[in-house]
Structure formats: structure tokens, C-alpha cells
Image: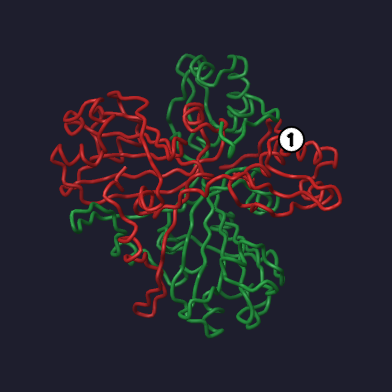
Chain colours: A red, B green
Amino acid sequence: MSAAMPPTKANASKTQRLYLLLRHGIVSGEIAIGEKLPSEAELGNLHGVSRVTVRRVLGQLEDEGLISRQPGAGTFVKDRGVSRPIVAELANALANLNEMGRVTSVKLLSFAYVRPSASVAQSLQLGPDMLTQRSVRVRMANNEPFSYLITHVPQPISGTYSEQDLATHSFLSLLERSGVEIDRAEQTVTVTLATPEMAEALKIDIGGPLLSITRVTFDKAGNGVQHLQGFYRPDRYRFEMHLVRSKEAEEFIWKPSSGEVNRAAKRNAYT
Amino acid sequence: MSAAMPPTKANASKTQRLYLLLRHGIVSGEIAIGEKLPSEAELGNLHGVSRVTVRRVLGQLEDEGLISRQPGAGTFVKDRGVSRPIVAELANALANLNEMGRVTSVKLLSFAYVRPSASVAQSLQLGPDMLTQRSVRVRMANNEPFSYLITHVPQPISGTYSEQDLATHSFLSLLERSGVEIDRAEQTVTVTLATPEMAEALKIDIGGPLLSITRVTFDKAGNGVQHLQGFYRPDRYRFEMHLVRSKEAEEFIWKPSSGEVNRAAKRNAYT
């Protein structure tokens, strides 16, 4: 164990871990519908738990309708009739949604002027006393929430729109209306755990894993105009990239496939 | 709660949840070094726990050297002297490592011929009885593990290299030696929880969140030549994209910035 990741000493039970692991595997689709789970003995050996514990966990998952235990045959992942997760081009967070025939909507949860955290202020290159307009939105597909979006916009851009504007317009249209000329963005992808607010809005457990994307957008003068943190339910949303080989000066590299990006891109790609 | 994500009924304690949330926030850098945590009362209200529970969790984090509690002033995230996580271009999983002066190494954990799972077989478009060569590798930077890589290669390509070859050569050089002409790849990004094997290899807790990338590579004839699943510790690794604005036919889209991708690309980008 390193200094960066000390061992968990709090009392997480092995039962709970096995339950969460299997449940995540099934709900995320990593363990496919119809797939057979390892035997009780195998699960017990692999996770260092007794067969009594394995049976308790499987019983729980069966109660939740995730698996089917067939005596003599084994345990199988049930077809729960869930829709496939949204798959979007990474460069265009909302691309493909229209093509897939999904109906998306946005709910504005909060709207305020705040002193941003040090990391937001630094990303947007703000002075020490500058406030940002902070909004929290939840995006839904067919009325099911899949992303939780925290956005910071500095003054004076944020002075050009109201809470009512944001509840009824896309961020892109509001930024364009303000006269901002968007030039480029930097996007980072990582993983986080759901806070109580995120968990409530996304209808998941507190501490559940989320895909996390931070995007900082700059105008043509190089000023930061928007800081967006997007948190995505992994069972409902995943990102995809199409890459093509490129060989330049004896170097082997991957390049994003522009054709695919263009095909997938849609006007409201800018969340 | 939807059918896809039933409520957790197993007995996850609120203490454990608060501990894991705060610990992840600190270790991942989401809560910055020097940042002040909310007060005990605020944490209790937010997470629905008593101040006794909050104090127990903070005491645990203090014991682990993650925070410093300063009576009268508050609780602050300690500077643990940890190195910044590796940040790599998404299109090139190992780009930037050399630029950052990191020494990376690979350890081969297993090498076998297996009947692949249905999802691997489908991705590689394999017939029902085809075997794949499955390897598990761990990649380290400065002797600290940061990624766990499971790779499947179909016959007859996999017949051109041995376990010893894979332990000592890059996958790219072995595929090229076999005569494969790599053309394109499809990459999906999501989140998963560490299995016992991943946790042991990556030195994290079982069930800890990992960034998960699946890449399927195809040759010029459109045949699948490699299926790679990479699992990354979020405190040690994150992906980055540089995007530029593109306006075509009145559509607003983001495009990956080729210049940045080229700059970052390195020969051994192909894991």
C-alpha cells in the first residue's frame, strides 16, 4: 500500500463487497444477460467468503430480480428488459442521442452566484475575488436521469442570462447570445463516487461509482468562459471513440477518426 | 429507483460511506491539498449522520495521514507529497509518459489460451469454437501499479508469439511481427469496480472504483485482431482530450485537436 492509498480500516464487510461487485457487474452489463455466474464454491474461493455468505448475496440479487437460480443448472443473469446505455462520442457529449431516438430533457436544480473553489478559479484563470454563476442541472433520457452537471461561468458573461433563461435555453445558445466566441476546450476523464446530492438526483446509492468529465472552454482571446463537471451513471451512459491508425515519421499513433466524429456530431452537442 | 438500479438493501453503514467518499475525494485530488473540509455539523447534516460518526470518520482519516485537524481553525487536507496523476491523451493511452520522465514497466501476470466470453467473441467477430490467447498484465510507473490490462488475441495471430515474447516485447511489435496491418480501433470508456484480482494487482481495496477502457482493434480486412480491457486507478491516471471548435454547415461541433494529439503521441502508445 502506498502513501496515496492507505488500506481501508473501516469495517466494510466481505458480504457487502461481494454484493456490490456482482450487482455492479450485472447492472453495468459487464456480466451479460444470460451469462452463467461462477458456482457458489468458486465465488467463495475467489472472494474469500463462506458458501453461506455467497448464498446470502445471491439470494439478495435474486430478490432484486437481477439473477435467476436454477437448481442443478446454475445461476444466470436475468433479462430485465433494460434499455442499452447511451453511447456517445467523447468529443460530443450529446451526439447520437437524436439518432438513437432518445428524448432528452434537462432539469435545473440550482442557480446561484458563488465564490468558486480554488481549482475552478485556477482553471478559468480568475482573479481572487471574482464570482461565478454556478448551476446544477440533471439531464434525463426518457425521463430517467443519466447525468449531473455542475457549471461555472465567470462574470461578465454570466450577467447576460437569468435563471429563467437557463431553465429554458441550451448553454450554447446563451453563450453565443452573450457574444462569446468559443474556440477550444480541454476535457479530462476520470471516476468519482456519488455525493448525497448526486445520488439523490441520479437515483443511485451514495458512494456509487460515476464517470466524471471536466471540460474547460476558452474563447478566441484565451479566456476561460465555462467550467463544466459532468457526472454520468455508468449503467446509462458511456463514451466511445473511433480511432484510425496513423503512421508519421516511423511513429505509430492513433488518431481520432474525424469522419465518425462529424457523422455523430449534433448542434446541441455543447452541454 | 428504476428496474435497472434497485436500492442497496445490504447493510452498508453510513459511517463507511462517509469514510469512503471523503477518502476518495482526498486521494483522487478532487478535494485539493490545503482545502478546508466542511465543519463537523455541516458534514453530519449533509450525510445524515451524527457528529459522533463524523468525528470517528475524521479521526480515521487523520490516522491515515490524509487530513489535519486544527482546533479552532478546522480540518484541512494534508500535503502528502504524492505525485500528480499521469495525464494521457485518450487517443494514446501511453502518450506523455516519456515526456513526464516516468519510468514505466510491465509485469505479465498470466498467459493462457481460453474460450473467450460471449462479449469478447462478438467484438472480435469470432466463430463459436475459436480460442483466444488471453493475457493479464499490470503496468507500473516508478514501480507503482496504475493499470491492469486484459488482452485477447485470436488465432492464428496469437500463434506467432510465446509467453516469453509477451513478457519482453510490446504488443505492438508482436502484432507487427505477425504480419498484421492495423487499421482502426473502437474504444469505449466507462467505470467499473475492482475485482479481487484487480485489487491485489493494483494495491487498492476490492470494490474500489476504476476507470475502464475497452479497445477493439481491426486490421485492413476488417478482422478483429486484439481486444483490450484496461482498468486504471483514478488517483494515478486520467485521460485528457484537447478539443477545437468546428463550424460546418451551421452545425456547432467539437473536434479533437490533431495538433495536440500528434504532439503527445509516442511510438509505444499501443498498449
- Residue A252 placement: quadrant: bottom left
- Picture quarter with the N terminus of chain A: top right
Residue B177 vs A163, above or below: the answer is below
Number of marks in the rendered image? 1
- Picture quarter with the C terminus of chain A: top left
| Residue occupying image coordinates x 64% and y 31% | B8
Residue A250, given in percent of the width and then of the height, sits at: 38, 80
Camera-side residue of B9 and B231:
B9
| Residue occupying image coordinates x 70% and y 66% | B110
Residue B92, given in percent of the width and then of the height, sits at: 43, 63
> From the viewer's perspective, is A183 left or right of A143?
left
Residue under circle 1?
A60
Residue at the outermost left position: A179
Q: Residues within 10 Å of mark 1 (few under 14, many from 20)?
A: some
Query: Which chain contains the residue that carries disc 1?
Result: A
- Residue A120 placement: quadrant: top left
Residue A182, given in percent of the width and then of the height, sits at: 20, 47
Camera-side residue of B176 and A95:
A95
Residue B202, given in percent of the width and then of the height, sits at: 63, 52
Residue A115 vs B261, above or below: the answer is above
Give the residue type at disc 1. Gln
Kind of element beneath mark 1: helix
| Residue occupying image coordinates x 54% and y 48% | B191
